[in-house]
Amino acid sequence: MLTEAVVAVSGSDPKVSVCVVTYNHERFIEPCIRSLLEQETGFEFEVIVGDDASTDGTGAILASLARRDGRLRVMTWQKNVGGTQNFLAVHNAARGKLVANVDGDDVAAPGKLARQVAFLDSNPSLVACGHRMEVINEAGKSSGASFPKHLSATFGLGKLIRVGVPVMNSSIMYRKEFRDLKKSSGEVLDWYFMGDILKHGDAGYLSENYGYYRINSKSAVSTLSREKMSDIVLDNYIEGFREWPGMEKDFFARAILMFLHRKSLGLPISSKLRWLLRQSVTPFAIGSFIDGAYWYLENRPALAR
């Protein structure tokens, strides 16, 4: 069951909805929410938080913040439902035409919302945009790295398939009209969610740091085993392969990278991965593979724990 406590909601729809998903982020959730509510903009925005039945003090902190600012909507699950269902519920509740996502342990930099809105307003052909984020540790100290290190001014579905999500999930702002995914019976990672949007068009990239990505050892992703996470990623790729025609060479490039990654971790090569390799093998895929491999080598070290 999902309940929502709202102190005050404007009668008119805001231009932007910022969606935040959280679970046991007692140490991080207040800086995250404050960094959003303190954004200076020339438009109305709301912040919607989905608390997945946190067992620490996250709920109390959110309730206190909501009492002081009517732009904050808090949706609380009475029973833990997992990241996918929480994510979709919060994004389905968004009222703005533009929707941003920020994870509950990350922080927005000043100017983030205004800059992304101005960019999308000036580029109506783009369906979304992301930006560079500085990598910080659990205490909020900078690691000296940013992600991504390199990315072209625009990117599309092919880039997403070859390299994974080329920007952090907490940097994405998209046009709500281009999100088809409303519900899912299984686990959907940010890769599949972004693909659902990029199948409609390209996204833009802002090379400035407009946020802080926190390496959190207790995040939902971190607590999954490497094999379990790899299996979920592979399932999402197989779903994408079936739904996004004409991208065989890109899927082949990614399947090769998955194969090499699993080998390096000592994980078994599953029948699903062998199926994806067989189905996606295509001539002239070498360029896609090189792009994916170069991206992995250039950018992934920034996120190494």
Image: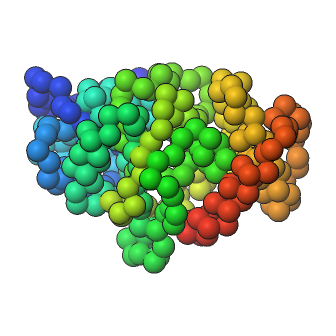
For residue 291, what is the image quadrant?
Answer: bottom right
For residue 140, what is the image quadrant?
Answer: bottom left
The answer to whether residue 63 is left or right of residue 186 is: left
The residue depicted at 55 percent of the width and 69 percent of the height is 302
For residue 126, what is the image quadrant?
Answer: top left
Q: Would residue 112 be visible to someone looking at this image?
A: yes
For the residue pair 162 and 14, the one nearer the viewer reads as 162
The residue depicted at 56 percent of the width and 35 percent of the height is 195
> From what the image shows, is residue 142 above or below residue 8?
below
The residue depicted at 14 percent of the width and 53 percent of the height is 40
Q: Quadrant of the N terminus?
A: top left
Q: Quadrant of the C terminus?
A: bottom right
Q: Percent from the top left, x then y, of residue 289?
A: 75, 52
> From what the image shows, is residue 281 above or below residue 304?
above
Q: Percent from the top left, x then y, of residue 69?
A: 13, 43
The answer to whether residue 155 is left or right of residue 113 is: right
Q: How many marks?
A: 0
Q: Percent from the top left, x then y, of residue 298?
A: 62, 67
For the residue pair 101 and 200, the one nearer the viewer reads as 200
The residue depicted at 44 percent of the width and 26 percent of the height is 179
> From what the image shows, is residue 62 above or below residue 222?
above
